[in-house]
Amino acid sequence: KEILIATRNKGKAAEFESLFGKKGFAVKTLLDYPDIPDVEETGTTFAENALLKAETIADKLNMLVLADDSGLKVDYLDGNPGVYSARYAGERKSDAANNAKLLHELTNVPPEKRTAQFHCTLALAAPGKDSLVVEGEVDGRILSIPHGENGFGYDPLFFVAEKNKTMAEMTEEEKNAISHRAKALINLEKVWDEWISMLDK
Ligand code: ITT
């Protein structure tokens, strides 16, 4: 039994490997398939992009595929960078460049107006079958200086009140207990058995 996580993001891949390993599936990612071209994310919603990634790769490799489309929604920025989170500062820019752009957009915005959510949509696809979509979110606030070295992306700026630390100050285990990705996986868990049993029909 094998599942391919349709991501090349090393941060996501690491989280999925620890979150998913327990299912008895051998977990692979697109980092194991360097020759498969990137799926262009032309959708305007997380669900569209997650489905696009999952179904394109499932058909191409004839495998069970899980795709994650995720991002940061900042209330003051009307939900941006949203689906553009990975390319906020431009194509192929670093996490540091994206974080710098975010801080610039929030210059002089006071703490109480810096509320945000991390969002995760997961799409599960198999060739010739109806796909499954689930979501998860976590609330936070965007700091004005980065804190912590762990995680990836916007983690050093995303402060979680209940934990009194940023996502980048959490261990991988702590982040995986509360993250948007973890919550989406809990929702996936609820419908997993029923969906998987359909594969043999
Ligand atoms: P794949 O499409 O290969 O999975 P990607 O990084 O392009 O990789 P997305 O299009 O879903 O993936 O963009 C997600 C971006 O949102 C990601 O690059 C980060 O900037 C941000 N993001 C998502 N989850 C995050 C997390 O847990 N911590 C910090 N930033 C996150």
Image: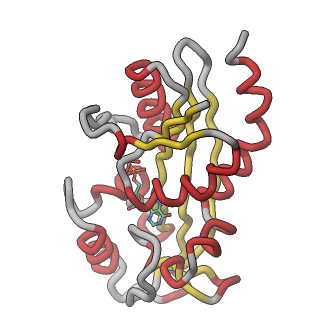
Residue beneath the point at 43% across and 19% down: 59
Residue 118: x and y, percent?
54, 63
For residue 38, side relative to residue 176 (left or right):
left
Residue 195 falls in image quadrant: top right
Residue 19: x and y, percent?
63, 56
Residue 124 falls in image quadrant: top right
Which quarter shows the N terminus? Answer: top right
Frontmost residue, 26 versus 3: 26
Residue 160 falls in image quadrant: bottom right
For residue 157, side relative to residue 93 (left or right):
right
Compared to 86, does 76 lie above or below?
below
Compared to 187, does 33 lie above or below?
above
Residue 67: x and y, percent?
49, 40
Q: Which quadrant of the picture is home to ligand 1?
A: bottom left
Frontmost residue, 5 versus 109: 5
Residue beneath the point at 32% across and 74% down: 99
Residue 71: x and y, percent?
46, 57
